[in-house]
Amino acid sequence: MRAKISASATPRRRTSCVRLWWWWSPIAPFRDWPTFGERNLSSGNQRNEGTFGHDYTEERMATAEVTGTLRSSAESVALASQLRRLARIATFIAVLTSPAAYFWFHKQVGLGVGESIAATAGVVIAFRGFVDLVIRRLIPWPSLFGTEETRLREEDVVNRRRAWTWRFYFRVGIWLTSVITIVWLFRLAKNKPDATWPGAATSILNGIGHVLSTPSLWIQVIFVFFLFMANFLIFMGPMMLMGISQIRGYEPGDAEWGVKLDDVRGQAEAKEEVRRIVTLWQSGEAFERAGGKRERGLLFLGAPGTGKTMLAKAIATGFNSPFVSIPGSGFAQTFIGIDALIVRWLARKAKKLARKWGGQCIVFIDEIDAVGLRRQALQGSSMALPLDTVEPSFYGPFGAINSSGDLIHESAAWREHMFNMRAPERRSPYPPWVNKAVDIVNQGIFPGMMGGGQGQLALNQLLVTMDGIDNPPFMRRFLTNRVNSFLDAIYIAPRRIGRVSLRLPKPRPLGAQIYFIGATNVPFERLDPALTRPGRMGRHVWFRTPTKEDRKDIFDLYLGRVAHAADLDTPVRRDEIARITNGYSPAMIEQICSMALTNAHHEDQTSFTWQHLVDAMTVVESGTAIGVKYTPGETRAVAIHEAGHAAAAHAYRPEIESSRLSIRMRGGSLGHHQFFDREERFSSWQSEEAGDLIHTVGSMAAEHVFYGENSVGVSGDLGQATARAATMVGVWGMAPPPLELNGHADDEVREKVDKRLRYIGMRLMNRTRGSADFHADPVASVLRDPFKSEMAAQFLGRAFVTAYAFCLANKDKIDQIASTVEEKMEIFGDELNRLLDAQHLEKPEIDWTKEETWPRM
């Protein structure tokens, strides 16, 4: 739908000027020629539907006066054809009147024949350029959008380029004329005898020549330039050099990391995805000929220590192409703008290596979040946490799910937490004295110049660089544009003769394929969307923390490299090793294999055994295990506490499997029960959550069965149980199901049972959290609601009574578990599960109406 505008003064004035110039110009004898020739673009045939004479012109002018623009592409094509004809007529008129200019230069000015011809040609060309400017000023440019005729589109480009070139020449001419005129008027005011306009121009040229021929001027220019560069290098050079020095370029054969793609274990999906992409990088010509487009960049996402850098090295080793790496800290600069220079230096080095080695190069940016975080202007659009999401809490060095540290549940979230805890602290790439000097400068010596080490411009420059990798070289584009513009502007050089072009060809990209790989461990939502969009780092490869099956795969690699006992190669033993090393990274697995072999060699053995491996695990974790001895009574109490956890979990949580039971002090915990999910799951049922509550309060129930009271060590268990119960009723909409009362349907009995359960639950409920803000503390917010609080208390009370009845019915068996762990201090893997299975723990039938069912509290 075409937008109409009212007839304003401007189009009416321009229309009158066009008519006046049309009828009174030197081409008036040609005004009876056809004014506009339309083309019927809807059909394939081209035919002239134009009318002739003044009537058609008046109609077109009226249309332009009403709409202010062209009505259709057909009219644009017709206008383009008529403008081309008008330009040819103007050239004809200029050439026709050129003898007068020649005789004036030759006779009046006194130039030679050759000089007069050259000057005449210049006048004709300048007149032709002036006519083009006047035409483009009075008549709107024709829009050829949608026109497929190559000749018209090419001529339109030439005309626009000519107009731009002559507009520049005339502006320069007007400026020079103004300067000469001012000098002339100034000399005229002083009554100088040679005060002529040509004399003023000559005087200016002589003065410029005298200044430029003075040796002292050039000495001063060179001296000032040298001082500027010296000051820049002294002041900025060291900091820029520290950033550039972190850019490491490796050519094929320069470095061997000894890492192959098959050595990257535990990331089968990520490795296969990378293998597909790298195959297209290396030999994707057929893919591009079929219409595909190779990925420009890869983004590795995952927790620290999951193999992102190792996989990048494997790509560089197997790709057999140059490899350029830089850490994200390399872009952190003190002064604004230095980080952008480092990005340009990085791109230059990558392009140089790519041209040298067949046109391909890989750029790896480790910890790219240091430069690629979401910019400040986009912070408001970051993803918010949904209201129905409650982030899990982890405590202590082993990521326990309760504050006392004695329940450790291996889950995907737990593994992410542990790997993030092991991430090395990010440090400045500069020495301490540089950081100290930067702090002094930032206090006000050079206000407004500091970049703060955040790489403000590095991200912008990196995005521009990634988009411009395939652009032709700047100088080649500049020279081609200027030469072709000059040839078009002089009018006498045709664009082509037949099929032979008389212009420089369009510059093409050098064909260097630069591929970017970034690695980060921050959440994807915190990265700038401009960096992660398709066309840049649009292919995202996720690295998960090693699960049990992943750890088996990693052990297959590292155990195959060291001498070990044959019994460690059995499937049962490999499965057990993977279970008891939950939370281990590939680097930790390699370390315990090497340490186990060290222990074996210390005992004059050529290969290590299962015991050596377990001892190595203990040494690796010794940084958090404290070698203290409890009193006999305290040792027994801790063993009972942990045995209550393990027994309740074995009976009421079939979806998990115990991997370690320990009464060794670690951090603030006197012992712990460690377990993991048998299967990777992403949701759970109410019955499973109720089993989790029984497992959590099983320690307190065991203490009440054996001692008639509980210790202070249950505080973390009660906090975890309270949070779980509040989440069940306040977030997940769960409610306690009706109890089976063995045929007693009396409401009074049911109310009595519910009241006792609520009392026990209220007594157990942790009340240390007081915030009412759901986002700040969702548990406290739920517990402030009396109705929700009563239901949470029901859940807690029922779980504790169930755990108490279970421990009471299995008291001797729990005592046997506690005695065993008290003797060995720690039990791992299959040994622990055999111990639990041998007890034949039973879930008792609970009669809620009997008094002996209820604990004395």
Image (cartoon, grey):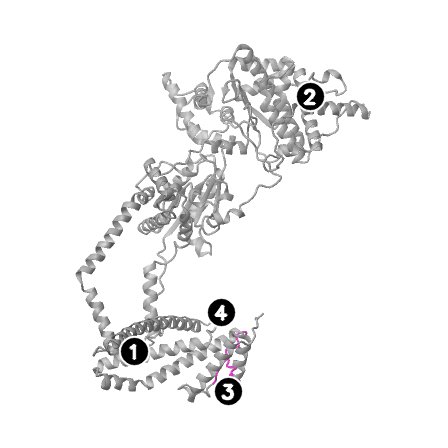
- What is the CA distance from the residue labelled 4 to the residue labelled 2? 80 Å
Quadrant containing the N terminus is: bottom right
Q: Is mark 1 on a helix, strand or loop?
A: helix
Residue placed most toward the observer, 592 or 100 = 100
Q: Quadrant of residue 368?
A: top left
Residue placed most toward the observer, 690 or 173 = 173
Q: Which residue is drawn at 69% across and 17% down?
A: 855
Q: In which quarter of the image is residue 511?
A: bottom left
Above or below 498: residue 576:
above
Note whether residue 396 is visible: yes
Question: Does 637 sit left or right of 181 as displayed?
Answer: right
Sequence-wise, the earlier of marks 1 and 4 is 1
Question: Does 216 sit left or right of 143 as displayed?
Answer: left
Residue at far right of view: 746
What kind of secondary structure does the magenta stretch mostly adopt? loop
Kind of residue at badge 1: Gly
Q: Name the residue under label 4.
A: 145
Q: Name the residue under label 2.
A: 801
Q: Name the residue under label 1.
A: 122
Q: What element carries label 4?
A: loop
Kind of residue at badge 3: His
Sequence-wise, the earlier of marks 2 and 1 is 1
Residue placed most toward the observer, 853 or 111 = 111
Q: Where is residue 811 in the image (x, y as percent from the top left)?
A: 64, 14
Residues under numbered marks 1 and 4 in contact, where contact means CB atoms less than 8 Å apart: no
In magenta segment, residue 47: yes
Q: Residues within 10 Å of mark 4 (few under 14, many from 20)?
A: few
Camera-nearest label, 4 or 2 = 2
Q: How crowded is mark 1: few (under 14 residues within 10 Å), some or many (20 or more)?
A: few
**Stretch of the chain drawn in magenta:** 34-57
Q: Which residue is drawn at 71% across and 18% down?
A: 854
Sequence-wise, the earlier of marks 3 and 4 is 3
